[in-house]
Image: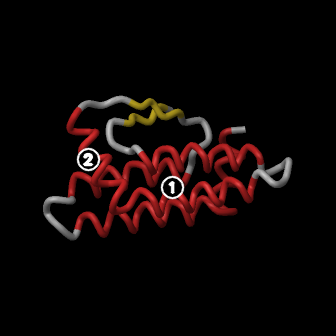
């Protein structure tokens, strides 16, 4: 399911979520202070492009908490809302439920990306 799911996901909507993560990364990289946040966006864009077969482990410390608060205010809410709305629309059909679950995984990641580790 992983390879076929990733192919269907990429062609039917994953490309747009990945592009949104890449755009957020580019906007963060405009400032020198935002480069670490931008590089984290680029890492998670690969998850948004191909989410099947990958798990997200959440953790982190004080620095991750501060970065997540800053991220949530500036970029997290729009990315999380777009992924959640996409997930709800996909879950309206039985065939779209696995794809909707991947959207919810990306929406949760969009709210708390710092301190998260993606495992294959």
The residue where tag 2 is placed is 67
Q: CA distance from mark 1 to mark 2?
A: 16 Å
Residue count near mark 1 (Cα–Cα under 10 Å), binned few <14, some 14–19, many ≥20: many
Left or right of 111 on screen, residue 6 = right
Q: In the rendering, at what x and y percent does residue 51 appear? A: 57, 45
Q: Is residue 75 above or below residue 51?
A: below
The residue where tag 1 is placed is 80
Left or right of 98 on screen, residue 53 = left
Left or right of 25 on screen, residue 77 = right
Q: Residue furthest left?
A: 32
Mark 1 vs 2, N-terminal side: 2
Residue at image position (56%, 66%) is 16
Residue at image position (38%, 49%) is 43
Q: Residue furthest right?
A: 94
Q: Nearer the viewer, residue 78 or 22?
A: 78
Q: Quadrant of residue 118?
A: top left
Residue at image position (22%, 34%) is 62
Residue count near mark 2 (Cα–Cα under 10 Å), binned few <14, some 14–19, many ≥20: some
Tag 2's secondary structure?
Answer: helix
In the rendered structure, are the residues bearing label 1 and label 2 in contact, judged by CB atoms less than 8 Å apart?
Answer: no
Q: In the rendering, at what x and y percent does residue 60 appear? A: 30, 31
Q: In the rendering, at what x and y percent does residue 109 appear? A: 47, 45
Q: Nearer the viewer, residue 55 or 109?
A: 109
Q: In the rendering, at what x and y percent does residue 9 appear? A: 67, 54
Tag 1's secondary structure?
Answer: helix
Q: Quadrant of the N terminus?
A: top right
* Residue 102: mark: none
Residue at image position (40%, 63%) is 22
């Amino acid at each position: 399911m992983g390879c076929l799911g990733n192919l269907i996901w990429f062609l039917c909507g994953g490309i747009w979520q990945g592009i949104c993560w890449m755009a957020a990364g580019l906007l963060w990289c405009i400032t020198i202070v935002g480069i670490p946040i931008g590089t984290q966006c680029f890492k998670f864009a690969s998850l948004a492009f191909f989410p099947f077969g990958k798990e997200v482990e959440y953790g982190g410390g004080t620095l991750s908490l501060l970065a997540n608060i800053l991220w949530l205010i500036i970029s997290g809410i729009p990315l999380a809302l777009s992924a959640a709305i996409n997930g709800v629309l996909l879950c309206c059909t039985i065939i779209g439920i696995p794809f909707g679950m991947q959207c919810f995984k990306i929406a949760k990641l969009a709210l708390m990306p710092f301190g998260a580790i993606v495992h294959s």
